[in-house]
Image (cartoon, rainbow, N blue to C red):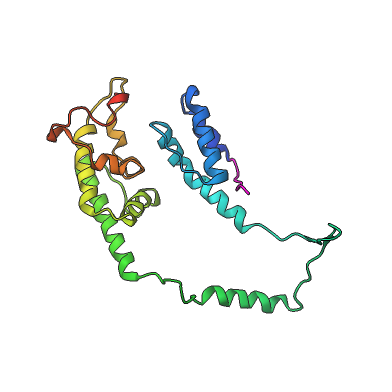
Amino acid sequence: MGRSFTWFPKLTRTVERVPEGQRGVLLWALALYGTDGVEPELEYPLDMAFEALRDDIDNSLRNRLGNKGGRPRKTKDSGEETEVPKPENPGFEEGNRRSEAQEPKPDQTMPNQSNTDQTTGEVRAIVAYLNSQSGKHFRASAASTAKPIKARLAEGYSVEDFKRVIDVMCAEWLGVTAKDGRDMTQYLCPETLFGGKFERYLNSRGKSEGGGQDVFSQYA
């Protein structure tokens, strides 16, 4: 059974900013992700628009799952709905559920504080390096900044991998104006650099390495 999510006005406003000929692709990607959890493979600018809306869809899905209530069950023979008996002491049962939720299961792994501290330190180091190379002022404490970095760290990428992507893409985009007048410096941000194309950027050859045109040359 598919999932369901709430369509917020923000989603409409964001889709309106996409070129009219590409809106259908973005709408279909949002629908598939929201109902079936399908990760889309989109090109610029659709990938950036999708990432801007991902959290809203995820939050809507979590809220809907949390607000689901019970309903009467149907009997096998008659198909008529019968009320499910309630416990005589609902307070006692609710207390038991809270206690069970708080007690760690044998197969559950408790968060390692040292690992959390290490990740936080790595996020700060990466953001500080990005700011120093791009002249920007991103905050490591901002969720939108830290989220893509933590996702790539969890995949096994190192701080040095992030620094290489920053160096390569700063050489490509910093102070560069595309043929259509866009300032490519705007794409030197965590959402773009450390998003779904991180592996592609990591393995691209920068101008300093004789790589020729940048990875966004098709839009320049």
Identify the residue at image location x=81%, y=61%: 76
Foreground residue among 111 and 17: 111
Q: Above or below — where is 67 with respect to 182?
A: below
In reply to whether residue 211 is colored magenta, the answer given is no
Identify the residue at image location x=44%, y=36%: 49
Task: Single out the residue that lies furthest toward the front.
Answer: 77
Identify the residue at image location x=43%, y=32%: 46
In reply to whether residue 4 is colored magenta, the answer given is yes
Identify the residue at image location x=46%, y=43%: 39
x then y, percent, for residue 32: 54, 40
Q: Above or below — where is 14 with respect to 4?
A: above
Left or right: 186 as drawn, with respect to 17: left
x then y, percent, for residue 117: 30, 65
Foreground residue among 182 and 88: 88
Q: How many numbered circles does the render carry?
A: 0
Left or right: 17 as drawn, with respect to 1: left
The quadrant of the picture occupied by the C terminus is top left
Q: Quadrant of residue 65?
A: bottom right
The dominant secondary structure in magenta is loop
Q: Quadrant of residue 101?
A: bottom right
User: The magenta stretch spans which residues?
Assistant: 1-7
